[in-house]
Amino acid sequence: MYSDIKIFSCNSNLPLAEEIAKGLGLSLGKCHVTKFSDGEISINIDETIRCADCYIIQSLSYPVNDNLMELLIMIDAMKRASAGRITAVIPYYGYARQDRKVKARDPISAKLVANLITKAGADRILTMDLHCAQIQGFFDIPVDHLVGMPILAAYYKEKFGDSLEKNFVAVSPDLGSVARTRNFASKLNIPLAIIDKRRPKPNVSEIVNIIGDIEGKNLLICDDMIDTAGTITNAANTLVTRGANEVFACCTHGVLSGPAMERIKASTIKELVMLNTISIPEENKIDNLVSISVAPLFSKAIKRIHEGTSVSELFD
């Protein structure tokens, strides 16, 4: 057994890290993550971690390369300080969309990042809603893969109650999200509709067809992440023009890059619900945006990993 459990955080999502530590009845470990004048990352761990069970909380969100390097250097520092076990807690795994070769000479960056984290010295990974679940197989160390959909389903059950089954339809924004949305719809006991779209170029989508009955219904669009919000806002606007009543949207990871906020504000989305795997800047917070914390789930998972008990029931 390890001597102690210690929770550390880099800079990507300190509020979430503090909430996770609080859920475990702990304070964040003492460390400083700064930069030298030339931009190099500087890590200082200000307490002993010898033989300790250490958890580093770091989402690989914007600026993704800085946050990745912070994580790698923190892992290396802990390894050299004789930490007993190092778990990289990555609520949002960056580069996950580059999980295969789409055309000749493409990199598989999601695999490269997995190699870097493993080589740096991490002993296991705790993450949530990978863009492609098969990325778990990119690691040669244990991966615990939490899912955010039950948290979102619970929110809508509490918000709408019995009216869900009468008036709502879950909508998959593309064919790749059908399995996730079907599971979401099953938990809410509502029908499923599917948007058939194409991407003429990156971050641009065009809706070709809508499979399912949406006429006069309230719709719940469910996705794993929202980046530039082109897909989700284009879907919402098109669904309303084709007879839907109100459109609600939800996702696990709110990347919200580029024109995302302007698109969301100008869209027909009545409410956007996101989990707080990525820290939302104050300037991006709008009235119809709801953030739900994943800290309780991560706290439970960390506690079970530390105690050597089953984590599997937290996966659904």
Image (cartoon, rainbow, N blue to C red):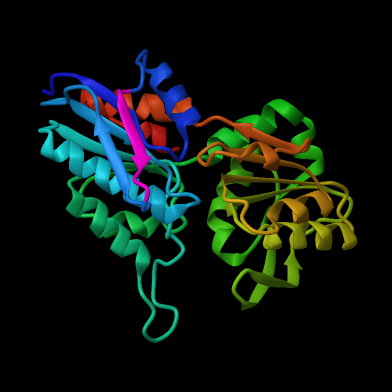
Asked if residue 219 lies left or right of residue 172, the reply is: right
- Image height of 241 relative to 226, above or below: below
285 relative to 67, above or below? above
Magenta highlight range: 29-37
Where residue 149 appears, as percent x and y from the top left, is 55, 41
Residue 8 vertical placement versus 98 (above, below): above
Q: Is residue 241 visible?
A: yes
Residue 311 shown left or right of residue 12 in the figure: left
- Quadrant for the N terminus in the image: top left
Q: Return the residue nearer the eye: 49 or 266.
A: 49
If the image is split into quadrants, where does the C terminus sit?
top left
Mark yes or no: residue 123 visible: no
Tally the numbered discs.
0
Q: Determine the image quadrant of residue 24.
A: top left
Q: Is residue 54 magenta?
A: no
Q: Residue furthest front?
A: 37
Q: Nearer the viewer, residue 60 or 246?
A: 60
Residue occupying the far top of the picture: 25
Q: Residue at x 48, y 52 (%)?
A: 63
Q: Quadrant of residue 112?
A: bottom left
* Residue at x 47%, y 36% (from the top left corner): 13
Is residue 33 shown in magenta? yes
> Where does residue 236 sit, x and y in percent of width and height?
78, 56
Residue at 77%, 38% in the rendered image: 288
Quadrant of res 150: top right
Residue 110 percent location from the top left of the image = 36, 62
Q: Position of residue 298 (x, y in %)?
A: 41, 30
